[in-house]
Image (tube, rainbow, N blue to C red):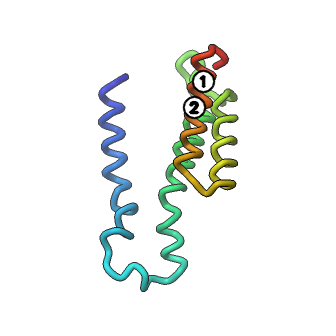
Amino acid sequence: MSLGLVALAVLMGAVTYPSRAVPLLAPGMEKLPAGVRLYLRLVGPAVLAALAAANVMIGTVDGRPAFHIGIEWAAVGASVTLVAWRRNLFLGLLVGVALVAAARASGMA
């Protein structure tokens, strides 16, 4: 693992933190219009979905980016289905990660 990736993760967290912290830090959030509150509530899941899509769909072939189909697609599908059914993001993420980890440990992926 490259230390550059750790620095990138820290930078991404610093850049996205203000939009995630607004509901916690701004007084009077309950007075905002419903559309604004909904937008702010959905920023986190939208960012997570974008990161998941980029990591699931794009792989490398001979060092070049390429479309990829693998166990990750099944993990994302299971995670989305579970989150929609149980309304629990943590449980959905946990199942998705466990599915990929089990597939990789068994040599299927």
Question: Do the residues under discs 2 and 1 have CB atoms within 8 angstroms?
Answer: yes
Front residue of 83/60: it is: 83
Query: Does residue 3 lie above or below 79 as drawn?
Result: above
The reply, left or right, for residue 11 in relation to residue 47 is left
Q: Position of residue 13 (x, y in %)?
A: 35, 48
Total residue callouts: 2
Task: Give the residue at the far bottom of this rendering.
Answer: 31
Q: Position of residue 15 (x, y in %)?
A: 34, 53
Q: Position of residue 81 (x, y in %)?
A: 69, 48
Question: Where is mark 2, residue-wise?
Answer: 98
Q: Amino acid at mark 1?
A: Ala
Query: Does residue 50 lie above or below 22 as drawn?
Result: above
Query: Between marks 2 and 1, how big is the CA–CA gap?
Result: 6 Å
The reply, left or right, for residue 30 in relation to residue 46 is left
Q: Amino acid at mark 2?
A: Ala
Figure quadrant of the C terminus? top right
SS class, disc 1 = helix
Residue at the spot x=69%, y=29% of the render? 69
Figure quadrant of the N terminus? top left
Question: Which of the 4 image quarters holds residue 55?
Answer: top right
Residue at the spot x=67%, y=17% of the render? 108
Mark 2, residues whose alpha carbon is within 10 Å: few (<14), some, or many (≥20)?
few
Residue at the spot x=56%, y=46% of the render? 91
SS class, disc 2 = helix
Question: Where is mark 1, residue-wise?
Answer: 102
Residue at the spot x=67%, y=35% of the render? 73
Mark 1, residues whose alpha carbon is within 10 Å: few (<14), some, or many (≥20)?
few
